[in-house]
Image (cartoon, grey):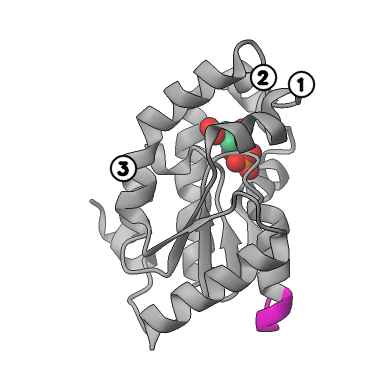
Amino acid sequence: MSDAHEAATPRPGAGGPKVVLIGPMGVGKSTVGALLAERLGTGYRDTDADIVAAEGREISDIFVEDGEPHFRELERAAVRTAVAEHTGVLALGGGAILDQGTRELLSGLPVAYLSMDVEEAVRRVGLNTARPLLAVNPRRQWRELMEARRHLYTEVARVVVATDDRTPEEVAQAVLDALEWKDA
Ligand code: S3P
């Protein structure tokens, strides 16, 4: 771990995001994140959008042109900058937690894992061609994806909030409730 890495990691209580949202694609991180930012009177930031703006190309193009390992490096750098600079609500891409360096950057932060079950996932993203990861056999692909990721989401999360059968407003409220009593 480099000194630069450690210097950019905010210490608990020394600023940093008020809430960090993690969870799989389609779970509603951006919708809930924007609602939370409004409720908290603060800004919303999304590392996927930061990467697209910095690179001047879509994430799908980065995957195709440079491969997933390169994308994860860009994502780690984007998370490092965002947790150092941003004091509002921050949402990360669904696979950000796959990278150990990114997981380390989240240590001590108020991280909320938004979860959903397989049926909800298939309803929300299974038929969405913009998310080819789940396009062929959504149920099986979802299960495999979550088997690889679930323990990493829970490892870095301070709180877990189930989104099944809840509106975005209800999820936002549940995140606030969970983090408030943990933070009190
Ligand atoms: C990914 C999720 C995406 C984006 C990229 C990879 C993943 O973010 O970072 O396409 O590996 O799950 P969203 O979770 O915002 O869709």
User: In the image, residue 173 lies at what x, y percent?
Assistant: 61, 73
Helix, strand or loop under label 3: helix
Q: Position of residue 47 (x, y in %)?
A: 60, 51
- Give the left or right position of residue 126, taking residue 73 as reference: right
Is 139 part of what is drawn in magenta? Answer: no
| Among numbered discs 2 and 3, the one appearing first in the sequence | 3
For the residues carrying marks 3 and 1, which lies nearer the camera in this image? Answer: 1
Q: Residue 51 has which mark?
A: none
Direction top: furthest residue: 136
Label 3 neighbourhood size at 10 Å, few (<14), some (14-19), many (20+)? few
Q: Position of residue 38 (x, y in %)?
A: 74, 76
Could you classify mark 2 by the number of other residues whose Cα lies within 10 Å: few (under 14), some (14-19), or many (20 or more)?
A: few
Q: Nearer the viewer, residue 28 or 3?
A: 28
Label 2 secondary element: helix
* Label ID, residue 129: 1
Identify the disc placed on residue 132.
Answer: 2
Residue identifier under label 3: 100
Instruction: Name the quadrant where ligand 1 sits.
Output: top right
Upstream in the sequence, badge 3 or badge 1? Answer: 3
Amino acid type of the residue that numbered disc 1 sits on in the rendered structure? Thr
CA separation in Å, label 1 and label 2: 6 Å
Identify whether 22 is placed above or below 32.
Answer: above
Residue drawn at point x = 71 percent, y = 59 percent: 167
Q: Residue furthest left?
A: 1
Looking at the rendering, the stretch of residues picked out in magenta corresponds to 38-43
